[in-house]
Amino acid sequence: MSNPKSLVKSAIGVVGLLVLFGLSYAVSGDETPAKFVKQGVDASSSQFIGGALILTYILMALAFMSWIGSEVSKMFK
């Protein structure tokens, strides 16, 4: 609370994650196989799970690209 600039940076990060999840949720499908329906998974749960998986894939890709970019920039220093 003593450093408002760090709070703003944290808020931007949280909002960014929420936006990415919203996009992932919107893109994911709500198909539910019969064996999952028997276990109590409905269409909204299926879409939420799909959104979480897509968000995970996006974050993994961003981390990998950041790692590669970091290594390439170290080569030129």
Image: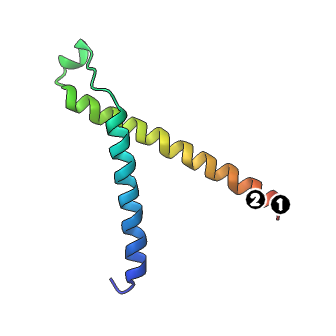
Give coordinates of residue 56: x percent, y percent. Answer: 44, 41
The relative height of residue 29 versus residue 11 in the rendered view (above or below) is above
The relative height of residue 22 versus residue 2 in the rendered view (above or below) is above
Q: Mark 2 points at which residue?
A: 73
Judge the density around disc 1: few (<14), some (14-19), many (≥20) Cα neighbours within 10 Å: few
Give coordinates of residue 65: x percent, y percent. Answer: 62, 47
Measured Cα–Cα span from mark 1 to mark 2: 5 Å
Give coordinates of residue 8: x percent, y percent. Answer: 39, 74
For label 1, the SS is loop
Judge the density around disc 2: few (<14), some (14-19), many (≥20) Cα neighbours within 10 Å: few
Q: Name the residue under label 1.
A: 76
Q: In which quarter of the image is the C terminus?
A: bottom right
Q: Residue reaching furthest top?
A: 34
The relative height of residue 4 versus residue 20 in the rendered view (above or below) is below
For image coordinates 28% across by 31% down, the residue present is: 47
Q: Which amino acid does label 2 sit on?
A: Ser
Q: Is residue 28 left or right of residue 70?
A: left
For image coordinates 32% across by 38% down, the residue present is: 25
Give coordinates of residue 62: x percent, y percent. Answer: 55, 48
Marks 2 and 1: in contact by CB < 8 Å?
Answer: yes
Picture disc at residue 59 = none
Task: Give the quadrant of residue 53.
Answer: top left
Q: Which amino acid does label 1 sit on?
A: Phe
